[in-house]
Amino acid sequence: MWKMEKEAINTDQEEQQIFSKILVQMFCLSCAFFKETDNLYEMLHVTPPMSSPDPLRQCAALTNETGYLNVNKHTLQHVTFPNVFGIGDCTSVPTSKTAAAVAGQFGVMKRNLSLVMGGASPKHQYDGYTSCPLVTGYNKCILAEFDMDGNPLETFPINQAKERRTMFHLKKDMMPTMYWNGMLNLSCPRERTVPYDSNVA
Ligand SMILES: Cc1cc2nc3c(=O)[nH]c(=O)nc-3n(C[C@H](O)[C@H](O)[C@H](O)COP(=O)(O)OP(=O)(O)OC[C@H]3O[C@@H](n4cnc5c(N)ncnc54)[C@H](O)[C@@H]3O)c2cc1C
């Protein structure tokens, strides 16, 4: 739903999205050359290619074919080495890589790691939660919250697909406090744990 409204907003603003192209050169602040095309623009938002850190990528035993730490996306336990767990951007978990996802994964990893250290098996499962506050203006924002399959996993009992001033202030004024006081001291307000079902692919 939020995706549909976001697409409508893009259309209103005549925004053009170019995916999987490599930016070669920007010219005269209005024209960008990509590998197979060139485009005029008024505002350009470029995302650099993403990868895991070199020392990890160079350790083939730990990583998958794309160089990310190869963990079970539910339990966050390494698929080969049971004493290795991973959370965050460097892992193979196929969720959109955000700090919100890290917060959601942390509690699952902590609980499963404790179980494994005590000789038991992982019992907790990450539900795939991730979140992107999509700032769509100087005072409005869509809080997109979804799982690793793109299904909405929303927090508030309101239509989160709408651009809202409240979400803008949540992003601008409250999230920094949540980050510095909640996440960095590991109190982890967004733990996303469900019971682990080993039959789920
Ligand atoms: C512009 C931007 C905006 C974003 N906005 C949001 C947002 O609004 N909401 C949200 O939830 N997320 C957002 N994110 C994503 C979020 O920042 C990341 O998902 C999050 O920081 C990942 O945390 P991490 O700990 O996994 O990795 P990182 O934060 O990348 O931490 C990895 C750390 O490891 C260190 N490191 C790397 N190699 C080595 C090595 N060899 N030895 C020792 N240390 C090493 C790095 O220096 C770094 O400090 C944004 C990201 C960007 C770039």
Image (cartoon, helix red, strand yellow):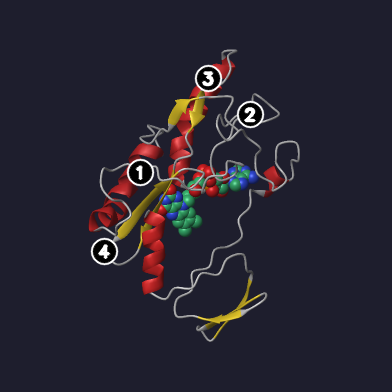
Under circle 1, the secondary element is loop
- Is the CB of the residue bearing disc 1 within 8 angstroms of ligand 1? no
Which is more N-terminal, label 4 or label 1? Answer: 4
Q: Residue at x 50, y 84 (%)?
A: 30
Mark 1–mark 2 Cα distance, whole angstroms, equals 31 Å
**Which residue is label 1 attached to?**
154
With respect to residue 17, does 184 lie above or below? above
Identify the image quadrant of residue 2: bottom left
Instruction: Choose mark 4 or mark 3, whichever is in front.
Output: 4
Mark 3: secondary structure:
helix
At label 1, which amino acid type do we have?
Glu
Q: Quadrant of residue 61?
A: top right
- Residue beneath the point at 49% across and 23% down: 111
Q: Is mark 4 within 8 Å of ligand 1?
A: no
- The residue indicated by pointer 2 is 84
What residue did someone put label 4 on? 139
- Residue 82 is left or right of residue 133, and the answer is right
Q: Identify the residue under disc 3.
A: 114
Q: Tell me the quadrant of the picture where the C terminus can be found.
A: top right
Give the side of residue 158 with respect to residue 43, left or right.
left
User: What type is the residue that disc 4 sits on?
Assistant: Asn
Residue in front for this viewpoint, 110 or 36 = 36
> Is residue 171 toward the left or the right of residue 21 in the image?
left
Q: CA distance from mark 1 to mark 4?
A: 21 Å
Distance CA(mark 4)–CA(mark 3): 43 Å
Q: Nearer the viewer, residue 161 or 115?
A: 161
Using the numbered discs, state the Cα–Cα distance from disc 4 to disc 2 in whole angstroms. Answer: 43 Å
Q: Position of residue 187 (x, y in %)?
A: 37, 32
Mark 3 neighbour class, 10 Å CA radius: few under 14, some 14 to 19, many 20 or more:
some
- Asked whether disc 1 touches disc 3, contact meaning CB atoms under 8 Å apart, the reply is no
Q: Kindly indicate whether the residue at mark 2 contacts the one at mark 1 (C-beta within 8 angstroms).
A: no
